[in-house]
Image (cartoon, rainbow, N blue to C red):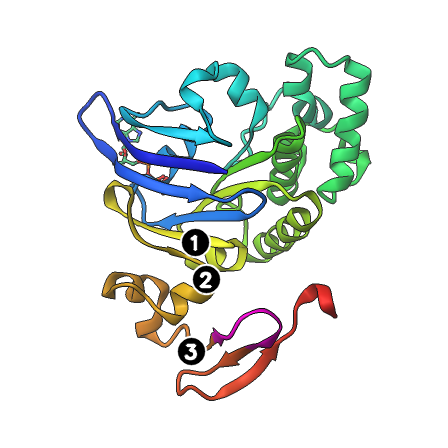
Amino acid sequence: MIEFRAVSKRFPDGTLAVEEFNLVIPSRQTTVFVGSSGCGKTTLLRMINRMVDPTSGTIDIDGESISTIEPVALRRSIGYVMQNSGLLPHRRVIDNVATVPLLKGVPKKEAHAHALELLDTVGLDRSLANRYPSQLSGGQQQRVGVARGLAVNPNILLMDEPFGAVDPIVRSDLQQELIRLQRDLDKTVVFVTHDIDEAFLLGDQVVILEKGAKIAQAGSPNEITANPASDFVASFIGVDKGKRALSLSGEGDSRVLVDSDGRAAGVLVDRDSR
Ligand SMILES: Nc1ncnc2c1ncn2[C@@H]1O[C@H](COP(=O)(O)OP(=O)(O)OP(=O)(O)O)[C@@H](O)[C@H]1O
């Protein structure tokens, strides 16, 4: 579990990016920060692995304040996947994936063997291992970025708009792949996006943010669509444009899809119980 308590971040130029932010991020679930540009999503994410330190407040991981953990060690224990994959252009795919394990002293042979397994995990053919990033498509590069994020077998995976730069079809593939991965690997995923549809697709917990990382609403996609907390949220999720004509009603095995007039439009069957 990751817990933010009264966390604020003011940058040296005076910008207050995050103000008094409080949130519990449950383990082994996906939490998505969603909001418009500049609302503080990336700053929140980077505070979890101490790429950015808060000005005030505390962040705990499993009850331990991260301010007591050495930043480089913390960063190497948490997976981080960013937009445009962030791959090192002059290194082959396999070396990109193995970067952090090698820095941590894992023998090269072992690190490379594990990197190949990770290519399987993210759905990439092992034959791509010796290519350079520029010889891959955008979607393949993002998959390598995810493999690299998983290379230290982290409990926590931070993902900063990882699918923002690819076309909609590839993006949809990557989203489905992440849902599958999360089912198999059971990580605590913290995901940043400005796309509410992506947030609702991937998030167990969705946190809708306004400027200064003020929480407009936090809850499951179901809770938010059924009960938007404000006009801002309703507008952000598109209720007012008729975008969310369908919502879910009920819990567990008996979830019913309801249309905007309250009529049952279908029953949602759990993927795992089919
Ligand atoms: N190093 C910095 N120095 C000064 N201000 C910063 C710095 N980094 C971010 N900011 C400011 O803090 C605010 C929050 O930025 P942040 O990158 O967290 O937003 P975001 O929601 O991730 O935006 P985007 O979706 O555009 O990436 C913005 O006003 C931004 O300009």
Residue hosting label 3? 245
Contact between marks 1 and 2 (CB within 8 A): the answer is yes
**Residue 221: image tag:** 2
Q: Quadrant of residue 117?
A: top right
Q: Is mark 2 within 8 Å of ligand 1?
A: no
Inspect the magenta stretch and tell me whether residue 104 lies in it: no
Q: What residue type is disc 1 on?
A: Val
Residue 255 placement, left or right of 180 = left
Which mark's residue is nearer the viewer, 3 or 1?
1
How far is the residue under mark 3 from the one under mark 2?
14 Å
How far is the residue under mark 1 from the one under mark 2?
6 Å
Q: What residue type is disc 3 on?
A: Ala
Q: What residue type is disc 2 on?
A: Pro
Residue hosting label 1? 206
The span picked out in magenta is: 248-255
Give the secondary structure at mark 1: strand
